[in-house]
Image: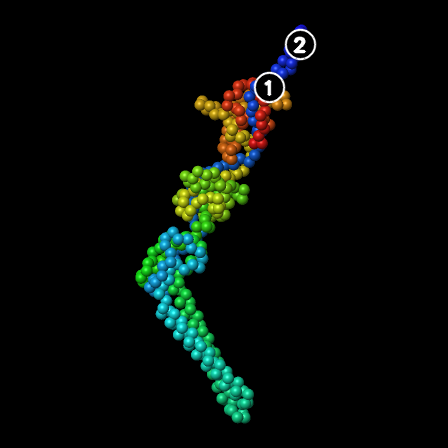
Amino acid sequence: MVRQLVALAGLWCFALPQVQAQDRPGVELAPVETSDIISEVSLNGTVNALRTSELSTAVAGLVEDVRVETGDRVARGDLLVGLDDEQAEFELASARAEASEALARLEEAQRRLAEARSVGAGRNIAATEVSARESEVAATEAALARLRAEEKRRQVVLDRHRIEAPFDGVVSDRISDLGEWVTPGDQLLTLVDTTNLRLDFRVPQDYYQRITDDSRLLVQARGADQKPVPVTIESLVPVSDPQARTFLIRATAPEDLNVLPGMAVQATLRVSTGERGLTVSRDAINRYPDGRITVWIAEAVDEDLYEVREKRVEVGSGFDNRMEILSGLEGDEEVVIRGNESLEEGARVRLAERGSR
């Protein structure tokens, strides 16, 4: 009996540390890092179409055919508006007939010249006659060239009675209607390219010199419930608005950003300050009503056992889920980023997970 009690006591003593370890709160740790300090600025911008055309006519005429309505999507080359082209067709047919007539005269002149040359000048035909026939061929060739040019001009005039889409897009406004007389320069409709969109933002001039190829721009549609999407800064316009002291940056809208021309967008611009400093995860920061800001530092006691102590810190700017630490840390510590809600000074905790940041 005594032996059994001794054995049970030994087992209890052996298991007690394991039970105590399991009862200790589990925390996740992450190292304090030295990294580039990033400055963030919030921007408001607008979605603009790369191409917006107010289509007009190059010839005067009566609107005879209207193929589109506001909101219709069209492809390049689609007929949008047609003008009455009956007279233009007749004029083209007349020009073609005149060109055909001139071609026939040229062929006859060339035949007569070849005949004169085959006989030979000075024998049965005068040399002046050969020269005259050569001049006739040259004049007829020139007349044919002029009439063919006129035929092409008439073809161009006829084609201009068709107003076609210069690119894929959406008809945002249609002004002309059937039966209206239009003249060159009159606006008929507006076509907007909705596939090639640009995001335009005005940035404070203080950031101009700090924007580099490594700068990041995160964009989301205003009021949209979606995560910010990283976009590429396409151009940086080196001209400042003298009134607002801002300059323009333009980015290409990615396909996964669901926006349309004219919509408002908001963005966060991240640029390097050119400095390096200590940073920790935002989750490591504890803020108190009295203004104190602290982090919990974990120091290893055993392989998976740590002792924590609270350290007051001064923070700087925040960026990319990180916070800059201005004072209070040395840089070689590990801080608690999960499970730090109810820790006590000097408490011992077990490692549940180790974070990389």
One can see residue 139 in this view: no
Colour scheme of the picture: rainbow
Residue placed most toward the observer, 62 or 127: 62
Q: Position of residue 63 (x, y in %)?
A: 34, 62
Nearer to me, 3 or 48: 3
Q: Position of residue 300 (x, y in %)?
A: 61, 22
Residues packed near mark 1 inside 10 Å, few (<14), some (14 to 19) or many (20 plus): some
Q: Residue at x 42, y 59 (%)?
A: 78
**Displayed quadrant of residue 213:** top right
Residue 72: % across, % down: 39, 53
What residue is pinned by disc 1? 21
According to the image, label 2 marks what residue? 4
Which residue is drawn at the image coordinates 39% and 61% (left, top)?
163
Against 68, is 347 above or below? above
Figure check: 217 above or below 92: above
Mark 2: give few (<14), some (14-19) or many (20+) Cα within 10 Å: few
Please give the label number shown on residue 227.
Answer: none
Q: In the rendered image, which quarter is residue 351 located in?
A: top right
The answer for how far apart the CA atoms under marks 2 and 1 are is 26 Å
Q: Are marks 2 and 1 in contact (CB under 8 Å)?
A: no
Residue beneath the point at 48% across and 37% down: 40
Residue type, numbered disc 2: Gln
User: Going 46% across and 50% down the picture, which residue do you hit?
Assistant: 196
Q: Amino acid at mark 1?
A: Ala
Identify the mark nearer the N-term, 2 or 1.
2
Secondary structure beneath dot 2 equals helix
Which element carries disc 1, helix, strand or loop?
helix
Residue 310 visible, this orientation: yes
